[in-house]
Image (cartoon, coloured by chain):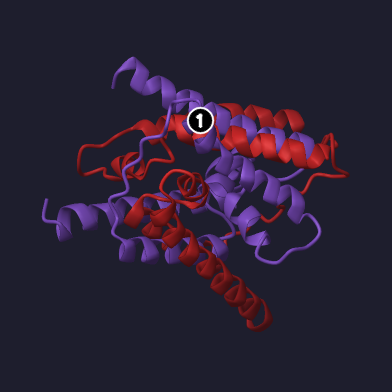
Chain colours: A red, B purple
Amino acid sequence: MKTYASAFGIGLLFGLGLCISGMANPAVVLGFLDIFGQWNPALLIVMVAALAVGIPGFRLVKGRRPLFAGEMHIPTRRDLDAPLIAGAIIFGVGWGLAGICPGPAIVLAGVEPLPAFVFLATMTAGLSIAAVLRDWLNAHG
Amino acid sequence: MTASGFLYPAIGGAMIGLASILLLALLGRVMGVSGIYSSLLAWRDGSGWRLAFILGTLAAPVLLLLSGRPMSVQIAASPPALAIAGLMVGVGAGLGSGCTSGHGVCGISRLSPRSVAATIVFMLTGFATVAVMRHLVAGG
C-alpha cells in the first residue's frame, strides 16, 4: 500500500510539475525548439531547475537503501551504442513534430483526450515495435 | 522574459526534479516515463507501482481543473502529424532506452554519459525538425 500511495503521489507531483512549468503545453515546447524563430527559453529553465534539484538530490540518495523497497535499480551501462543514438535521433524528430513527449502525453490525456489518445496509441505501437527490434538486435547483433 | 514567466518554469522544473529523487529514495526506481509506461504493456511483477505513478500523473490536470485552474494547452499538430509524431517518439524512446524524463532529468542528474549523449542528440534533432517544419516547409 505504501508503495502504491507513494508512486501515485510522486506521479502527481511530477504531473503538476509538468503542468505548472509549461512542459505539458506543446506550444511552449515547440517555442523552445524553435531556435530560428521567437525562441522561448521556458524549457531551458525547467531543465536547469529540475537538474538543480536532481544532481545534488541524486548524490544524497545514491548508495542508500530505498525506504519502501529492497534495493535501488539504477542503470549501470555507460557505453554509447548505435541503438541509443539512433533512438535519440528518431525521438527528437517525433518530439519536434508535435511538441509532445511521453510524460506530457499522459498529462494531455486529462486535458485534450482526443489528440492525446491519437498520440498515445501510435506511441504505444512504437514502443512495441522498438521492443521487437531490440530483441532482434540482441539476438543477431 | 518577465519575472512570472521565469517563476513557473523554475517551480515546475524543481517539482519534476524532486519527484525523480523521491521515486529513487522511496522505491529505488528511475523516473523514466517511457520505461514505466511500456512496462505496463504486459502485466508483471512491479506493474502496480508503475500504474499508480501513471494514474498520479494523469490526476494532475484533473486536480487543477477541479481546483478552478484548468490547464491551457495549444496543440497545433493535425491528427496525422500527431500519429506520426507519437510513432517516432515511441520507437525512439524504446530503441534509445529513454525519453526526456529518463535521460534528460534522471540520467543527467546521475551524470550518465549515455543520457547526456541521448539528450544532446534528441535536442539537436528536435531543433532541426522545428526549423524545417516552421521555416522551410511553412515558408515562415
Q: Which residue is mark 1?
A: B66
Image quadrant of residue A35?
top left
Residue type marked 1: Leu
Q: Where's residue A31, x and y in %?
A: 29, 41
Residue furthest out toward the left = B139
- Crowding at label 1, few (<14), some or many (≥20) Cα neighbours within 10 Å? few
Classify A41 as above or below A115. Answer: above
Name the one closer to the observer, B90 or A57.
B90
At horizontal 38% and vertical 41% (from top left) the residue drawn is A25
Quadrant for the N terminus of chain A, please.
Answer: top right
In this rendering, would A112 be left or right of A133?
left
Q: Is residue B115 left or right of residue A122?
A: right
Q: How many marks?
A: 1
Residue A14 image position (x, y, % from top left): 58, 36
| Chain assignment, label 1 | B
Q: Residue at x 70, y 33 (%)?
A: B22
Give the residue displayed 42% in from the left and 32% down from the top.
B70
| Whole-percent x, y for residue B11 in the image | 49, 23
Q: Vertical placement of B40 versus A133: above or below?
A: above
Lateral position of residue B19 relative to residue B132, left or right: right
The answer to whether residue A53 is visible is yes
Q: Left or right? Give the position of A94 relative to B36.
A: left
What quarter of the picture does the C terminus of chain A occupy?
bottom right
Give x and y (percent) for residue A111. 44, 43
The secondary element bearing badge 1 is classed as: helix
Q: Is residue A86 visible?
A: no
**Residue A124 against residue A112 in the figure, above or below:** below
